[in-house]
Image: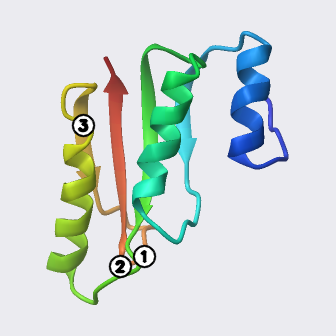
């Protein structure tokens, strides 16, 4: 494990330049727009830094709504973006997640 104390937009090109391949992508970023969590995973994939069949663990944080149903629907819309590029996708509400957070795990194809 190598911790890089920098923003993801700075880390991805640096990792690509170094020829690094990542087997596990985890992200618990607090973002204003929840869809950016998947955007960064996809950017890392496009940059070639993720290994084939890399596992991912993402915490999606809903900023809109107040109900479980609302949060679940928002996350489900994001998860559909992974269709065709990931497998074994599971969405969970972990005991450590806040009410508007969902953890999404899976493997890239």
Question: SS of the residue at dot 3?
Answer: strand
Whether the residues at callouts 1 and 2 have beta carbons within 8 Å, the answer is: yes
Q: Which residue is mark 2?
A: 99
Q: Which residue is mark 3?
A: 89
**Seen in the image, is 101 located left or right of residue 93?**
right
> Dot 1, crowdedness within 10 Å: few (<14), some or many (≥20)?
few
Quarter occupied by residue 82: top left
**Residue that protrudes farthest toward the bottom in the picture:** 66
Q: Work out how far the residue at label 3 is from the one at label 1, CA to CA, in angstroms.
A: 20 Å
Q: Position of residue 46 (x, y in %)?
A: 50, 23
Can you give x and y, in whole percent of width and height, for residue 93 in the image? 30, 63
Picture residue at 55% right of the left edge, 48% below the top: 27
Q: Is residue 62 above or below residue 20?
A: below
Q: How is the image coloured?
A: rainbow
Quarter of the figure with the C terminus: top left
Residue 1, can we see it?
no
Labels 3 and 2: the sequence-earlier one:
3
């Amino acid at each position: 494990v190598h911790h890089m104390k920098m923003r993801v937009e700075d880390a991805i090109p640096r990792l690509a330049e170094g020829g690094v391949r990542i087997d596990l992508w985890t992200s618990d970023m607090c973002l204003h727009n929840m869809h950016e969590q998947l955007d960064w995973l996809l950017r890392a994939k496009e940059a070639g830094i993720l290994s084939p069949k890399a596992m991912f663990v993402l915490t999606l944080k809903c900023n809109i709504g107040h109900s479980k149903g609302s949060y679940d629907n928002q996350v489900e819309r994001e998860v559909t973006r992974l269709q065709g590029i990931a497998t074994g996708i599971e969405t969970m509400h972990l005991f450590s997640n806040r009410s508007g957070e969902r953890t999404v795990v899976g493997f890239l194809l």
